[in-house]
Amino acid sequence: MIRPVLCGEGFLAEVAATATEEAGFRLWWLGQSGYLLQWQGRHVLLDPYLSDSLTEKYAGTERPHVRLTERVIAPERLDFIDVATSSHNHTDHLDAATLGPLLRASPRMHLVIPEANRAFVAARLGVPASLPIGLDDGRSAEVGGFRFTGVAAAHETVERDAAGCCRYLGYLVRFGPWCLYHSGDTVRYPGMAERLAGCGIDVALLPINGAVAARGVAGNLSGPEAAALAADSGAALVIPCHYEMFAFNTAAPDEFRRAAERLGQPYALLAAGQRWSSAGGLGRA
């Protein structure tokens, strides 16, 4: 099993040590599509999956979710979170075994979700339907010192509820002079890159596990597709995710890396539990 660069006490110690840094921002990859964003002492969890709920659920089935990477941190240890997001209802992006302990550890934490999923989220987490902050494609909200804007995601199509709200979203997260884009699970759809190109994205967080019908689950961008979307969107930097979590649904980052280098797209590859800092530069001219 892959051991994170930092986990447990070591991870918490590093997060605490950098919390008072005023310059720039920091990101830690938590595995799958989960990240911890730190800026000026504030913390956002993006689509955290910090449990073994899927491994337990699918044990002994035709689709076992064999974990490849050890957990970075137990969710109940994170008592300093200001905002958490869920981009859609799949358990690795909306995990009751992660978000339940988080809400108890950080009772003032805000939860940002697609408006279309409000009833489902409330039922899964056992929280009042009024608790989550619902967004839709193009809708924004100021939450915990950050500005979140919903961007339609296609996993593998852009799905909407009866009211026309998207069931799958990515999020633009703006704070200070920065703009982060977390796509959630998505493939590329017409007009996506053109829309993102006007957003001034500093860091794009994109899945690279691809779409393989034999897996029996909805697909995502492949490595080369993620690199191309980042380049066409004008992202200063792209960091790949959604791999090295489950043995049946992963991809090596090699093709992503080669495609990014061929396109001249700046990128960073993180290991689970590893920190990236904007102080290292973003590659924007």
Image (cartoon, helix red, strand yellow):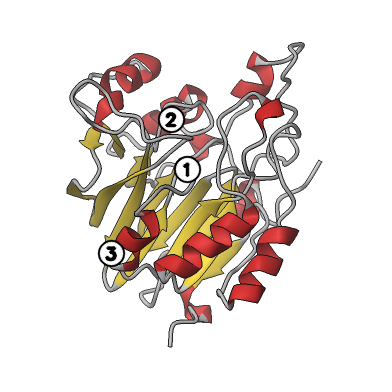
* CA–CA distance in space, label 3 to label 1: 24 Å
Other-residue count near label 2 (Cα within 10 Å), few / some / many at <14 / 14–19 / ≥20 = many
How far apart, in angstroms, are the residues tagged by discs 3 and 2?
Answer: 23 Å
Q: Secondary structure at mark 1?
A: loop
Q: Whole-Å distance between the Cαs marked 2 and 1? A: 22 Å
Residue 175: which disc? 3
- In the figure, is residue 173 to the left or right of 12? left
Location of residue 36 in the rendering, given as x and y in whole percent from the top left corner: 47, 52
The x, y position of residue 97, in whole percent, is 51, 24
The residue where tag 2 is placed is 99
Amino acid under disc 2 = Leu
Amino acid under disc 1: Thr
Q: Residues within 10 Å of mark 3 (few under 14, many from 20)?
A: some
Which dot, 2 or 1, sits closer to the camera?
A: 1
Q: Is residue 188 above or below residue 238?
A: above
State the mark number for residue 110. Answer: none
Q: What's the residue at 42%, 25% (across, down)?
A: 100
| Residue drawn at 76 percent across, 34 percent down | 247
Residue projecting furthest to the top: 60
Q: In which quadrant of the rendered image does the C terminus lie?
A: bottom left
